[in-house]
Image (tube, helix red, strand yellow):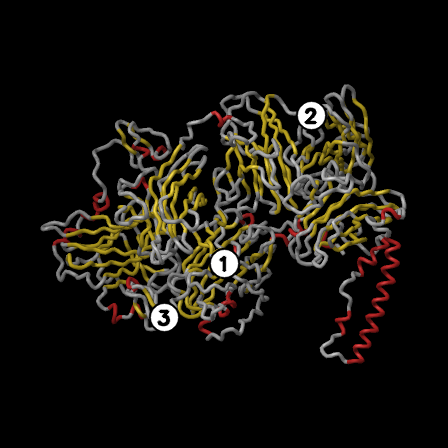
């Protein structure tokens, strides 16, 4: 079994945010079934293959004719037809007829019958993240966690008037009392006024959930119980915006669980009740206040006449003695946000219930009448309670028996505390007493909390005492005020404050309990902190918090003995009386903080089939992370397991979660024993905790993975295409953002707190960012109480190879100031991998970096003179000068260096210099490239100097043409340490500037503009991903480097495996016109130039899908001048295109799809742009590998062939018209294999009529 998700988190201040975990059936592969572990966790379990039928469009879904169901059987959460076709109109696309199967809509195929019924421009639409350029919605859906998944979304609306967008479900029918609805929602920038979920049936609309925040980041889960709904109903999800809240909301993975009523059966299992509608229910469901049959025959007055049921609809009944409780309903205004929206009896806002009005810290008590004692039968008490709004709320049930003369001390039978949500929870107590007794129900509300009671049902064996005895009078006085203290064991008089633990002369405060450090001499402060052999009734502090049909109980092995068990006690899964979701939960007290070596050791047994599970979860700040789950097919024998917990902040709790069908075949069950927490003391350190330098061969040194995120770094051994840097066969740290499927923002790899040795240290490391759509890798420094300092970052693919980077660490003079280093892999890309290896630290500063994007810092560049060069972005839109976008990211959020050359800042002829840090000597010639942006008109001159022992000028640039980022390059040879100096010489022009970005140093001489053999990289070609095209990038690799993607075995330049090329794997592309661009630097206008390149396409001949296009992009638009569909030739082919253009332009290689994705690469090599030269005819010897036609020749032949086909088509159409072919349409004669735009483009001179924005890829032909 593999879990779908665990947890994603971000950090804002000291707050950790919730996991993004899927509960969707389709999030697993089709051979698995998903089972929820709770609010945020899900497991994938082996199950039958589910075939999904073709999707129908919204409003046109039709029920197949396999089964004609009555209208009452359609969308009733029961597969009345064998193929479940009666449920397809309400979003059920599966074929499983298992009664417990969830009815789920993930919006991948269609809208599942959900419709927008909004009355303004603020509306719901089916959308996906990859379809919107910089949209306000989520960057990935919840189902798949990528930008290809679909969801329902409502975008921001600029109107000032409040408006509500409402999404309505299809008509559904007959929800069972156990029906639970789950969904995931996303609030962009936490910017919405209100969200609410309503259910309408008949004339009443029930508010199932309503909130105005606060909003967490990422996908949030909502789970509500609908209760029993008779007849038709609809659910609406509404988002409200106003002038201050713009309201960008998304909705995904809507799921209905356990909503179907029982199916009629000819014969019921032994002991079950046969309803009037032939359904079967368990005996304990009779007269329990819920319509379990579906026709209320299990609540028939003839059957339940001897039960004493109090629903508070007309009064208090016999429960007329109360303190602090009041009878109320939900209609009208709510007393508090935690107030019940409906009662349990009627499932209506107009139904009555009891609610505690006692102030926090005081107890509300409700007394039953006096009942007769008996030892020959059990008096069964069934009740429903409500705990919501506060973790400090408390509900307790006591039994007080009548002694010979005076009442005995109350005995605690049930105790529940904390937050149980908005549902009414059922419980049951079997009472056997030889003396008359009373039941006392006590509720204590925490701040903002509500405690409620409804449907108190005494069984027929609970006999009232005819006349009230002294018990009543004794309890009617001041005795109840002392009720709560009487339930506790009386301790000797102590001087410790409440909540503190007394041990000897010491008072241990609550925050030091269970912190893995012994403060008491005997360690009493660590006794109930999770470590236990379960031989003591305290169970090591583990507490059952189940509310469903299962619970954890402390039992003797002889009474519940798994195979091979020895005598003693353990924690066992047992049946319970709750009616809600069935998972059993056992929770520790608050623990921590813990150290990075913290482990949990335990023994467990688990036997279940087919859909059970046993798991360990960490609960931190209310959010959950799945740590471990028992493997499928467990034999049921005891197994020893070790689970790494790692370093965690206080408070965190551990929770065992399990779901097993105890009534299923075989000896199904689960148990836990001998739980031990080891090496958790955070104050105990080892030698490796201070090791920043690490090659990961032995272990992870001081580096450990961050928690509360469902994406994790893993230390792995070299295998397949994943090879380490140290030896090519060793270990390294690895991150795949989608394996396992994740929803969080990213994964953290961080060190233990370190003490600086010197004021400056150099941290070097090797990294790999590889894949057509990989995200961002960041390095930051963290100090206690301060914001993280970003030191370094890289985004997008950097080719299939290891790169070295280094960063200077600047420490504070105070030696006591500790710091942590952390690498974060951000999930803003979903196809590719990240890796780290060979991290090293040495005293002193680093050499100047080989590349600088200015995204994280100024890279050590120092402005000279007046310090006029500044590091900035235009994210606010308020920058007084400089480019609107940077070159690295192509967005206003990107950073660059800029100098204001206006005469009032830098007078004409004056110089502003920008000097790098010291570069290490070069062993061979290198190429220094940089991108510059100069305002229009001419701001002056940009000069580039190399400063070795002396300063020498290498390049001088003056502005020309329109304002744009342009590439500059300088050949550098330096046998000594050297610096690069950029000088801006002002021309005295108002509102002028010069800017620099993406400075890089690469081995080898600089190539000619527009040319590249790809041996040292991509040269001046940019593979910046375009979000509107899916955010994909061309990659760079060689045949000798193992790759997870198909690629050519040899390059063209060298003809060997060692040679390099640019390539793109088209199988990652999704629908919707997605593509990847490889763009040249801006090239000057030309009357005749030749573009020559070699390409490789590897697709099956009869299943070609990929396409390679050549586009010309200028200020007046983009135009396709050449294209080729993919087919398998397993060889490099040459193309040459003669181009001419009257203005500055860029060449764009576009890889795209001609149909559905197919596995196959498109590769490029030896691109040459011969400025001012005509293309030469290739020699005959090149015939087998070269395309011997240039564009003008191809145009002539293509146009003649096209005209011939048109004439043939017209002749054929005329002949068919004369023959009157049955069913033939005139439009069928249109040729589908030709694109007029492409053929018209072969002359390549851009027409004057094209005025589209070159920055918009949507304008492509």
Determine which residue is flagged by label 2. Answer: 917
Instruction: State which mark lies toward you, 1 or 3.
Output: 3
Classify residue 616 by image quadrant.
top left
Image coordinates for residue 687, horizontal then vertical, percent: 48, 25
Q: Residue furthest left?
A: 404
Q: Is residue 478 left or right of residue 202?
A: left
Classify 10 Å Cα crowding around label 2: few (below 14), some (14-19), many (20 and above): some
SS at mark 1 in the image: strand
Q: Closer to the N terminus: mark 1 or mark 3? A: 1
Residue 873 visible in the shown view? no
Classify 10 Å Cα crowding around label 3: few (below 14), some (14-19), many (20 and above): few
Q: Is residue 216 left or right of residue 874?
A: left
For marks 1 and 3, give the CA distance. 30 Å
Image coordinates for residue 1166, horizontal then vertical, percent: 79, 42
Q: Residue at x 24, y 45 (%)?
A: 484
Tell whether label 2 touches label 1 (CB within 8 Å). Answer: no
Q: Is residue 135 left or right of residue 818?
A: right
Determine which residue is flagged by label 1. Answer: 254
SS at mark 3 in the image: loop
């Amino acid at each position: 079994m593999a879990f779908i998700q665990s947890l994603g988190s971000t950090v804002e201040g000291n707050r950790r945010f919730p996991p993004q975990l899927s509960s969707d059936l389709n999030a697993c592969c089709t051979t698995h079934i998903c089972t929820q572990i709770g609010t945020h966790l899900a497991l994938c379990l082996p199950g039958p293959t589910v075939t999904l039928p073709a999707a129908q469009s919204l409003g046109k879904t039709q029920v197949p004719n396999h089964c004609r169901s009555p209208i009452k059987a359609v969308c009733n959460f029961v597969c009345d037809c064998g193929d479940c076709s009666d449920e397809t109109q309400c979003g059920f696309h599966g074929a499983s007829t298992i009664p417990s199967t969830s009815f789920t809509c993930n919006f991948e195929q269609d809208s599942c019958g959900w419709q927008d019924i909004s009355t303004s421009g603020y509306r719901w639409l089916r959308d996906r993240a990859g379809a919107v350029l910089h949209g306000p919605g989520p960057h990935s859906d919840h189902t798949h966690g990528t930008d290809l998944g679909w969801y329902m979304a409502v975008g921001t609306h600029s109107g000032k008037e409040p408006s509500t967008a409402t999404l309505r479900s299809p008509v559904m029918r007959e929800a069972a009392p156990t029906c639970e609805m789950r969904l995931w929602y996303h609030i962009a920038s936490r910017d919405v006024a209100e969200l609410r979920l309503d259910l309408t049936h008949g004339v009443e609309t029930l508010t199932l959930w309503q909130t105005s925040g606060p909003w967490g980041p990422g996908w949030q889960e909502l789970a509500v119980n609908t209760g029993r709904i008779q007849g038709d109903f609809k659910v609406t999800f509404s988002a409200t915006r106003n002038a201050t809240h713009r309201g960008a909301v998304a909705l995904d993975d809507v799921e209905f669980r356990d909503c179907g009523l029982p199916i009629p059966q000819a014969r019921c299992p032994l002991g079950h009740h046969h309803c009037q509608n032939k359904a079967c229910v368990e005996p304990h469901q009779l007269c329990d206040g819920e319509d379990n049959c579906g026709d209320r025959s299990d609540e028939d007055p003839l059957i339940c006449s001897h039960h004493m049921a109090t629903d508070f609809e007309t009064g208090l009944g016999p429960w007329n003695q109360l303190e602090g409780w009041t009878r109320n309903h939900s209609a009208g205004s709510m007393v508090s946000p935690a107030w019940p929206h409906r009662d349990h009896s009627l499932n209506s806002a107009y139904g009555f219930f009891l609610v505690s009005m006692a102030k926090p810290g005081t107890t509300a008590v409700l007394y039953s009448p006096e009942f007769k004692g008996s030892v020959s039968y059990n008096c069964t008490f069934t009740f429903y309670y409500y705990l919501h709004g506060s973790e400090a709320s408390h509900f307790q049930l006591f039994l007080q028996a009548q002694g010979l003369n005076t009442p005995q001390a109350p005995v605690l039978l049930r105790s529940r505390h904390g937050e149980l949500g908005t549902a009414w929870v059922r419980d049951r107590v079997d009472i056997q007493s030889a003396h008359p007794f009373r039941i006392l129900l006590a509720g204590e509300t925490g701040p903002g909390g509500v405690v409620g009671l409804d449907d108190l049902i005494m069984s027929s064996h609970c006999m009232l005492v005819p006349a009230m005895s002294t018990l009543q009078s004794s309890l009617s006085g001041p005795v109840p005020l002392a009720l709560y203290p009487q339930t506790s064991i009386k301790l000797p008089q102590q001087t410790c404050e409440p909540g503190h633990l007394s041990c000897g002369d010491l008072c241990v405060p609550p925050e030091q309990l269970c912190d893995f450090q012994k403060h008491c001499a005997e360690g009493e402060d660590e006794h109930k902190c999770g470590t236990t052999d379960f031989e003591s009734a305290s169970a090591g502090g583990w507490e059952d918090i189940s509310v469903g049909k299962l619970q954890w109980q402390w039992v003797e092995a002889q009474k519940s003995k798994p195979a091979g068990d020895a005598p003693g006690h353990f924690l066992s899964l047992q049946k319970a009386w709750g009616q809600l979701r069935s998972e059993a939960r056992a929770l520790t007290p608050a623990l921590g903080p813990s150290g990075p070596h913290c482990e949990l050791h335990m023994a467990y047994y688990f036997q279940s089939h087919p859909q059970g599970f046993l798991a360990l979860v960490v609960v931190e700040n209310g959010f959950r992370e799945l740590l471990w789950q028992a493997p499928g097919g467990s034999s049921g024998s005891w197994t020893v397991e070790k689970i790494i917990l790692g370093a965690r902040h206080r408070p965190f709790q551990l929770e065992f979660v399990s779901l097993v069908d105890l009534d299923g075949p075989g000896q199904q069950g689960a148990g836990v024993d001998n739980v031990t927490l080891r090496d958790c003391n955070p104050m105990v350190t080892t030698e490796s905790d201070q090791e920043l330098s690490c090659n990961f061969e032995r272990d992870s040194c001081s580096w450990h993975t961050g928690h509360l995120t469902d994406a994790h770094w893993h230390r792995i051994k070299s295998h397949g295409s994943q090879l380490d840097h140290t030896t090519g066969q060793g270990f390294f740290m690895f991150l795949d953002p989608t394996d396992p499927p994740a929803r969080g923002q990213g994964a953290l790899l961080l060190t233990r707190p370190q003490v600086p040795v010197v004021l400056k240290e150099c941290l070097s490391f090797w990294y790999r960012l590889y894949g057509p759509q990989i995200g961002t890798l960041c390095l930051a420094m963290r100090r206690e109480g301060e914001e993280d300092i970003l030191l370094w970052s890289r985004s997008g693919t950097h080719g299939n190879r290891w790169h070295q980077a280094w960063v200077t660490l600047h420490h504070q003079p105070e030696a006591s100031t500790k710091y942590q280093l952390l690498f974060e892999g951000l999930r803003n890309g979903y196809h590719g991998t990240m890796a780290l290896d060979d991290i090293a630290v040495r005293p002193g500063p680093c050499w100047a970096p080989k590349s600088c994007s200015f995204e994280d810092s100024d890279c050590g560049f120092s402005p000279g003179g007046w310090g006029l060069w500044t590091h900035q972005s235009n994210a606010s839109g308020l920058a007084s000068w400089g480019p609107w976008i940077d070159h690295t990211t192509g967005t206003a959020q990107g950073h660059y260096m800029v100098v204001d050359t206006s005469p009032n800042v830098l007078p004409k002829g004056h110089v502003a210099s920008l000097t790098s840090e010291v570069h290490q000597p070069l062993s061979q010639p290198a190429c220094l490239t940089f991108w510059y942006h100069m305002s229009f008109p001419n701001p002056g001159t940009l000069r580039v100097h190399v400063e070795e022992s002396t300063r020498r000028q290498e390049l001088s640039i003056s502005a020309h043409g329109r304002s744009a980022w342009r590439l500059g390059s300088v050949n550098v040879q330096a046998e000594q340490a050297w610096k690069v100096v950029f000088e801006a010489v002002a021309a005295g022009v108002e509102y002028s500037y010069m800017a620099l970005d993406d400075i890089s140093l690469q081995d080898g001489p600089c190539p000619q503009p527009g040319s590249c053999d790809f041996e040292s990289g991509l040269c001046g070609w940019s593979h910046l991903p375009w979000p509107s095209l899916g955010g994909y990038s061309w990659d760079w690799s060689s045949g000798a480097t193992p790759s997870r993607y198909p690629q050519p075995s040899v390059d063209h330049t060298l003809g060997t495996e060692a040679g390099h090329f640019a390539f793109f794997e088209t199988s990652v592309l999704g629908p919707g016109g997605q593509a990847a661009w490889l763009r040249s630097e801006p090239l000057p206008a030309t009357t005749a130039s030749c573009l020559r390149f070699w390409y490789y396409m590897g697709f099956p001949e009869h299943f070609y899908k990929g396409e390679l296009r050549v586009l010309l992009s200028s200020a007046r638009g983009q135009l396709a001048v050449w294209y080729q569909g993919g087919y398998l030739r397993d060889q490099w082919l040459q193309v040459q295109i003669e181009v001419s253009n009257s203005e500055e332009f860029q060449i764009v290689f576009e890889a795209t799809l001609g149909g559905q994705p197919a596995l196959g690469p498109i590769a490029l090599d030896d691109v040459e742009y011969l400025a001012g030269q005509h293309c030469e005819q290739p020699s005959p010897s090149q015939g087998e590998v070269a395309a011997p036609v240039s564009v003008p020749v191809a145009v002539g032949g293509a146009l003649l062939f096209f005209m011939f086909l048109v004439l043939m088509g017209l002749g054929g159409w005329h002949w068919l018209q004369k023959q009157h072919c049955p069913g033939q349409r005139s439009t069928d004669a249109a040729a589908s294999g030709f694109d007029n735009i492409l053929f018209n483009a072969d002359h390549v001179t851009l027409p004057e009529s094209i005025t589209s924005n070159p920055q918009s890829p949507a304008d492509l032909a």
